[in-house]
Image (tube, grey):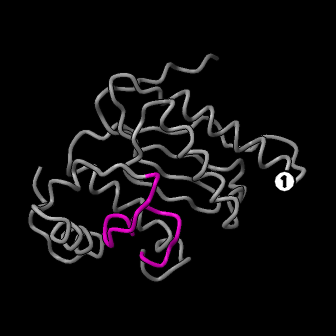
Amino acid sequence: MPRTRRIIPKESAMHIMCRGNNKLPLLANNSDKEQYCYLLHKLKFNNRVNILHYCIMDNHVHLIIWLGENSNLSRLMKQVSLAYYYYYIKKYNYCGHLWQGRYKSIAIKSDSQALQCGKYIELNPVRAGIIATPGEYQFSSYKYYTLGKQDPLISPSPAYESLGSSPLIRKQVYANFILNKKVSCLTSD
């Protein structure tokens, strides 16, 4: 049976998920995660997408990607997946499927949903029991938004930008939101 055509809206954000085949830990060490980040960074410009949030786990990847009028999400994901596949099979002498089917995508429909999805993504390593706090994890967008750490993968989320009038206020509001401290401005939508 043929696959159904993926609906990819323009001028919107998408939550993207990719998982290793059979939950294979295909990003199990720092050099593998660095390679995946390098490929995302290298290919995002050619495909005219902005990465707003990300978390690279051992066996899966979460991204929030902003799509403009001329973005090509399908090509980006194909290029990243294929380039990482060639890297992985060469490095590990691997044979077989690397990814578990096509990437999953969910349209994000509001700023509130974008912030909740970013929170979900950045707390992924905490929920997995890898770390105690999201600031301990190297391969996510958390430090960019809460500490102002430069990250060449990230383009600032419009939802994040609306959290306050200054970078300091935005960082504090977002950190409180992630750590479940009461933040009234994020509950409406």
Q: Is residue 60 rendered to the left or right of residue 125? A: right
**Extent of the magenta region:** 135-153
Q: Residue furthest bottom?
A: 132
**Circle 1 crowding by C-alpha within 10 Å: few under 14, some 14–19, many from 20:** few
Q: Is residue 83 above or below residue 175?
A: above
Q: Is residue 172 above or below residue 141?
A: below
What residue is rendered at 33% in x and 39% in y?
Answer: 13
Q: Is residue 22 rendered to the left or right of residue 156? A: right
**Residue 104 percent coordinates (x, y):** 51, 39
Q: Is residue 32 rendered to the left or right of residue 53? A: right
**Residue 130 percent coordinates (x, y):** 56, 77
**Residue 148 percent coordinates (x, y):** 32, 68
Residue type, mark 1 in image? Lys
Q: Nearer the viewer, residue 100 or 9?
A: 9
Element carrying mark 1: helix
Q: Which residue is tagged 1?
A: 91
